Image (cartoon, grey):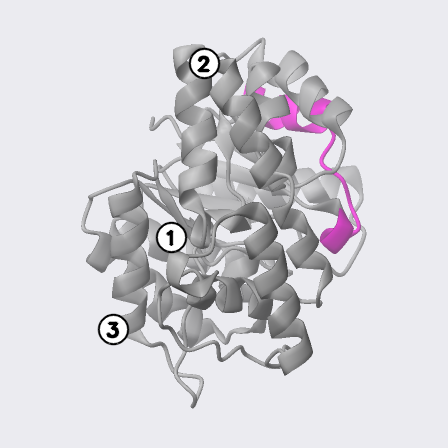
Amino acid sequence: MNKFKGIIPPVSTIFDEEGKLSKGEMKQLIDRLIEAGVDGLLFLGTGGEFSQMSKEERLETAEFAVSYVSERVPVLIGTGSTNTREAIEFSEHAQRIGADGIMVINPYYWNLSDANLYGYFSQIAKSVDIPVLLYNFPNLTGQDLSPDFVARLVDDYPNIVGIKETVDSVGHIRDMIMQVKHKHPDFSVLCGYDDHLLNTLQLGGDGTISASGNFAPQISIGIYRAFAKGDLRTAAALYKQLAILPQLYKLDSPFVNVIKEAIKQCGLNISTYVLPPSAPLNEEKRSQVKAILAQAGVLPAAKQ
């Protein structure tokens, strides 16, 4: 099974002004991220706007992504759904097109009983042979994946190989590492919030799948590499920069428009079109994006 670790950006899906997949601009973004030295790419995560897409759009995006990355780095495809049958269909499709793994969020409408939540993940894990990462984002799903629950799944399904922990609790990440990774050392614990990267690594976790990887990958890559070398001074200095960036995500909800604006301001001239109910940022919000990027020191020199 693949070991997912390091810096894995949840890639924004770029659309043209008609809302169609902009393959040319996606290629530019993918190439830039791979050249920056990322350890993998996730497509159709929260920032990839999967929840605003039709089934056909999700399938098209997954096929394009796997084909264009062409094994340069590992590719994860987000396949979760409120509907188990659809999640299985997306997962089987990801395996068929050659994805290296899938990331599965729990259903985000019903608060499921423990048995039904377990059934959802187990049916998906049984439907594929490729690695499965769980995606814990209780702020959006309304339901936390506890370390006890995850440990049970990992004990029963060897292809469940990791979790993205989008939780604002270091204690939760610590418990996931202590309870699951302690028993299964190859299990990957990746944080979802930028500002928990250094904490996660220090606790024995494996890296991050966080939005800033789209527009400032050099910071999180720098932290990860410095930490691996034992250079905590460099890691701490970069972490101070990284800790500024989550202010961006408070500018709108969904914040997918903010990420695209940040990508553009950081030097890649992409379309910032977002699928409704998201909407473009107004001039005031765009200025706020610029101010936060400037504060973090990630704007290109020409834009300072």
Foreground residue among 238 and 81:
238
Amino acid at circle 3: Gly
Dots 3, 2 in contact, CB < 8 A: no
Foreground residue among 69 and 84:
69
Amino acid at circle 1: Glu
Magenta-tinted stretch = 139-155
Front label number (3 vs 2): 2
Regarding mark 3 in the picture, which secondary structure is present there? helix
Q: Is residue 216 magenta?
A: no
Residue at position x 74%, y 30% in the image: 146
Q: Which x, y percent locates residue 45?
A: 51, 55
Q: Which residue is mark 1?
A: 92
Q: Which residue is mark 2?
A: 231
Residue at position x 47%, y 72% in the image: 55
Amino acid at circle 2: Asp
Left of 47 or right of it: where is 21? Answer: left
